[in-house]
Image: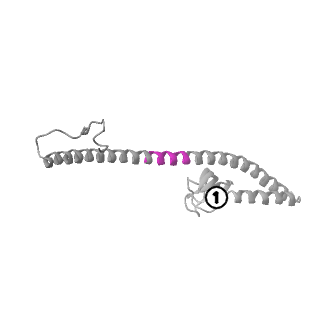
Amino acid sequence: MSSENNSDEIPINIISEKQTYSENSPEESSNKTVEELTKLLDEEKAKVSEYEDKLKRILADFENQNKKTQSDIEKGVNTKVDEFILDFLKIYDDFIRAKEVLSGNKINSDGLDSILKNMDSLLKKYHVIPIESLGEIFNPNLHEAISIITDPDLDDNTITKEIRKGYISHERVIRPTLVEISKKG
């Protein structure tokens, strides 16, 4: 006797949920399954496309926010540096005035000259450059006119005198030059 005959097991045919009992031919059943699968595939492709669009928008928003945050940080740092430089320039101006007084009274100002050279080096190191204005045409972005003189020999708005030196740092005016300008008589 074979072992198959002695088996107590009952043979069972398992039918999946997708399989249907139909009187149609197997080809028709297969075509319906292909149509259903194609429809499901198209639906999934639409979902993937929608998710890709959402992801692209989210990434663009993230990049924009990152740029804005970086810009805000730079502006904040630049503002604080500019405030410090402005305070430093007040002291620098005092040293220049002291040197002019000492030189005018024929007093040795060599020590003061050394300090001013160090200050000039510091300003240069941090890209703070003076605005050269004497003889130039008035530019409201660089200059602040505080007096006007009449001079028929000069063109209108020619800067005749610098009252206080102005400075630029990283292409930004941190202090405009106070100037005297001319008007034709």
Where residue 155 sits in the image (x, y, percent)?
55, 62
Q: Quadrant of residue 29?
A: top left
Q: Nearer the viewer, residue 182 or 138?
A: 138
Q: Is residue 31 left or right of residue 5?
A: left
**Residue 119 lies in the magenta stretch:** no
What is the quadrant of the N terminus in the image? top left
- The region drawn magenta spans 60-71
Residue 65, percent from left and from top: 49, 45
Please state the horizontal and vertical placement of residue 116, each as a whole percent of the image: 79, 57
On the image, the x and y values in percent for residue 32 come to 17, 45
Mark 1: give few (<14), some (14-19) or many (20+) Cα within 10 Å: some
- Picture quarter containing residue 96? bottom right
Tell me which secondary structure the magenta stretch mostly adopts: helix
Vertical order, 170 against 71 (above or below): below
Left or right of 41 on screen, residue 72? right
Instruction: Tell which of 91 and 50 is nearer to you.
Output: 50
The C terminus sits in image quarter: bottom right
How many labels, in total? Answer: 1
The reply to whether residue 158 is in sight is yes
Name the residue rendered at 69%, 49% in the picture. Answer: 85
Residue 147 visible from this viewpoint: no
**Magenta-span inclusion, residue 70:** yes
Residue at 27% x, 44% y: name it.
43
In terms of image quadrants, where is residue 161?
bottom right
Tell me if 13 is positioned left or right of 89 in this view. left
Asked which colour scheme the image uses, the reply is one colour
In the rendered structure, which amino acid carries the disc numbered 1?
A: Ile
Q: Say what secondary structure mark 1 lies in.
A: loop
Q: Where is mark 1, residue-wise?
A: 131
Q: Identify the residue at horizontal 64%, vertical 58% (top origin).
A: 131
Q: Is 88 in front, or is 81?
A: 81
